[in-house]
Image: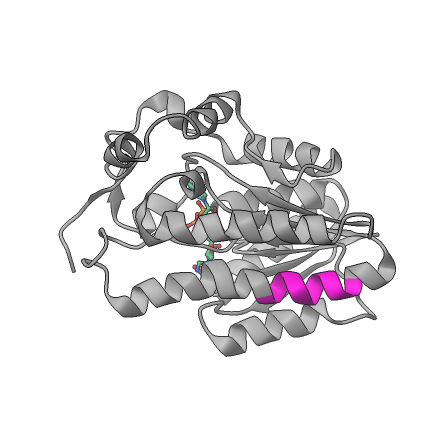
Amino acid sequence: MTTALITGATAGIGAAFARRLAADGHNLVLVARDEKRLHEQATELHDRHGVEAEVLRADLSEDAGIAAVEKRLADRKHPVDLLVNNAGFGNKGSFLDVPMADELKMLKVHCEAVLRLTSAAVGVMRERKRGGVVNVASVAAFLPRGTYGASKAWVVQFTQGAARDLAGSGVRLMALCPGFVRTEFHQRAGMGTDNVPGWMWLDADRLVDAALKDLARGKSLSVPDPRYKALTGLTKIVPRGALGRVSSVSGRRYGPTR
Ligand SMILES: NC(=O)c1ccc[n+]([C@@H]2O[C@H](COP(=O)([O-])OP(=O)(O)OC[C@H]3O[C@@H](n4cnc5c(N)ncnc54)[C@H](OP(=O)(O)O)[C@@H]3O)[C@@H](O)[C@H]2O)c1
């Protein structure tokens, strides 16, 4: 039986990965900060699918949290076959409205944690000549969209570069770039989404299904929806200034500043 470790497993896209991988018979290591929610989810997935679901409480915006997950990934007696670096969040506000501590926290969770956990996992996977890593980025990676877009651009570049370095090793790495997905993300970030048209919203379970198909096909970049494939294609030809005018407002109506 194989084991998958998912960060940010308690809600949204991470929870969809957990449901799908448990249904496929993978044992799980579920990572997030809310321990009660983690235990409830582990019990439910175990009872429904008969898989082992371990709980690892960790705050990936802190060194100790990242180190705890690195340690689990480096455990050669209980190897992890699939790592999903999914934990992430949005900050409330545009550049300069967001406190520097929150900007740095985002870089820690979206970039440093992804770098360190990918490295810890791939070290063991390479010895075993098999394994996979899905790093959840965003279509915002292709747009001028604040620190969020910049951090996700880093995820895409890092993942595709590492995938190239590991070609032929038996280890697959893939950056996953969703568009708007109905999860807790926007509410947590205090983002109003009234100006996001209905057709732009994706379903988390379908997204995960498409992502796992792309991973099996050996893709290093997955934009799993024809609408967003077309939009990311446009980002290559539309001038950056025009892109910035549109992307800096879509889904970025914030409530009152703190
Ligand atoms: N929803 C979208 O439209 C969208 C679009 C593109 C990309 N994404 C990306 O998809 C990923 C998942 O987002 P989502 O939409 O599923 O968001 P979500 O519903 O808010 O879930 C976020 C998950 O991450 C965990 N998390 C947040 N901060 C953490 C931290 N410091 N340490 C450990 N775990 C943490 C949360 O659990 P705890 O609070 O218990 O820690 C939760 O399980 C993110 O990387 C996001 O950037 C989302």
Residue appearing at x 27%, y 67% in the figure: 100
Q: Position of residue 118 (x, y in %)?
A: 64, 60
Query: Which picture quadrant has residue 24?
Result: top right
Q: Position of residue 11 (x, y in %)?
A: 48, 49
Residue appearing at x 56%, y 41% in the figure: 176
Q: Main secondary structure of the magenta part?
A: helix
Q: Position of residue 258 (x, y in %)?
A: 16, 60
Residue appearing at x 24%, y 31% in the figure: 194
* Residue farthest along the left direction in this orientation: 256
Using the image as rendered, state which of residue 142 and residue 193 is in the foreground.
Answer: 142
The stretch in magenta equals 116-124
Q: Is residue 151 above or below residue 23?
A: below
Q: Please state if 103 lies on the left or on the right of 152 as rendered.
A: left
Q: Please state if 247 lies on the left or on the right of 205 as rendered.
A: left
Residue appearing at x 26%, y 39% in the figure: 248
Query: Which picture quadrant has residue 196?
Result: top left
Q: Position of residue 192 (x, y in %)?
A: 24, 40
Using the image as rendered, state which of residue 80 and residue 99 is in the foreground.
Answer: 99
Q: Please state if 119 lies on the left or on the right of 243 as rendered.
A: right
